Amino acid sequence: MTMSNSVFPKGFLWGGATAANQFEGAWNLDGKGPSTSDMLSGGTHEIARRITRSIEDGIHYPSHEAIDFYHRFKEDIALFAEMGFKTFRFSINWTRIFPTGMEQQPNEAGLKFYENVIDELKKYDIEPLVTISHYELPFGLTQEYNGWAGREVVDCYTRYAETLFKRFNGKVKYWLTFNEINIGTMPIGNFLGLGILNEGTTDFVNQADIPQLRFQALHHQFVASAKTVKLGHEINPDFQIGCMICFLTTYPFTCHPADVQLAQQHMQMHNYFCGDIQVRGQYPYYAKRYFEENGITVHMEDGDLDILAEGTVDYYTLSYYMSNCVSANPDQETTSGNLMGGIKNPYVEASDWGWQIDPVGLRYTLNEIYARYEIPLMVVENGLGAFDKVEEDGSINDSYRIDYLKSHIEQMSEAVKDGVELWGYTPWGCIDLVSASTGEMEKRYGFIYVDKDNHGNGTLDRKKKASFDWYKKVIASNGEEL
Ligand code: BG6
């Protein structure tokens, strides 16, 4: 095997990605408080997850035990190391550090847990990639301020981020301020992204939406993110602090100019809006008309515009699972997708959950983003949610997952050849974990199988899938052997 022909740069960060609330479990141990995600019941593709206002008896809350990484992190990290991971993306659960979000002093037991995780990664030379906030606002902040709708949360967040920066200075270099911050441009982002729980909200799909409040809350996140970037650089100029966007690549369904126009609007407000602010440091020109037409007035405090300009990110990361189409004709057949569905594309296949599989779209997307910002990119989520079958001999032959990842890595390598500066690739749910949208365990993404079903039954034992050995070879050959 030679490494020399690989198109991926030397030191390319191959790894995997997770989020605290979807895999740690131990939801109320060692001083941890409840987070928004802890209030979400299990669901399915057809039955929406409920958002409960208190913990109810007899309800299955998937985050409460999840896959118990909290107690098994050594075993799991050893498996990541066996695959040759260069990096591991995980998030810190805010409520382990500040249980209600409003405390002045952090919870030492929470910090200690993450220190142990980071030290374990370092033991294997795995670079930690830390998401500061991934869909788990302290529920206390939802109760007190209706989440990010309250300006007060900016200070709570920066206190939390500062605590992490100081404690893990010298151990963590790569940070992300908010996971998929652009979920806040969509009604589905109210609870999960912004911690907003309006009267009338019942479940994950049917959330009462007040666009004015939502965009105000999003503004608070932009301010918090920018303050955090600035503060991080003051604490350690070597920190690399990035944004993270759920990229929902949107094509016009036809070349009808009305479809093209609509696709452009979708790309602007759902994909580019947040990145434009976090990378360029100012609200984009097209937001003005969107706000006017939707009755939105974002209230800004003195100095906010300066903060946004001073706290621009060092690199841009994205999740990419699928692409979508839009059409000006309301009669087209639709399909579901990540955060939002769209029109069915006749040229691509879809996963069992209706997400449209489009590897070429990844090359296109990386080029579009890089052309716009010209800063380094990282694909920090990508993958296929699928049902896996354990054979009688215990093997799991997830060739469909290998096909999916292989075709996306191929297109990533094309993007690198096109000239895109790409730092790394961390496929989602490198170990099976709870699905964010449905709460299912059986929507699996991992190289490592976890014995647990949608109802919470199972031994939690870990097992390597066929994709485990495949990915190990990919990493060892720096992406040459697919
Ligand atoms: C991303 C999220 O949108 O997609 C993850 O950042 C999530 O938290 C992932 O798990 C896959 O989505 P799902 O709904 O299949 O878990």
Image: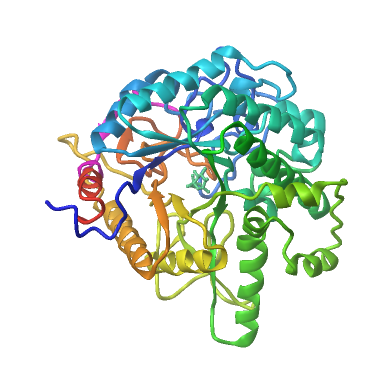
Residue 157 lies, in percent from the top left, at 69, 32
Point 58% across, 34% down: residue: 41
Chain part drawn in magenta: 456-469
Asked whether, in this view, residue 289 is left or right of residue 123, the answer is right
Q: Position of residue 321 (x, y in %)?
A: 45, 56
Q: In the figure, is residue 24 to the left or right of 121?
A: right
Which residue is at 37% across, 38% downward?
Answer: 87
Residue 456 in sight in this render = yes
The residue positioned 26% from the left and 48% from the top of the image is: 398
x, y percentage for residue 121? 37, 27
Q: Nearer the viewer, residue 146 or 472?
A: 472
Camera-nearest residue between 179 and 8: 8
Vertical arrangement, residue 394 with respect to residue 206, above or below: above
Q: How many marks?
A: 0
Q: Quadrant of the C terminus?
A: bottom left
Rendered position, 238 above or below 218: above
Query: Hey, which quadrant is residue 256 in on the image?
Result: bottom right
Residue, x 46% and y 59% (percent of image)?
Answer: 355
What percent of the width, then of the height, locates residue 5? 20, 60
Q: Residue furthest bottom?
A: 256
Task: Say whether residue 60 is magenta.
Answer: no
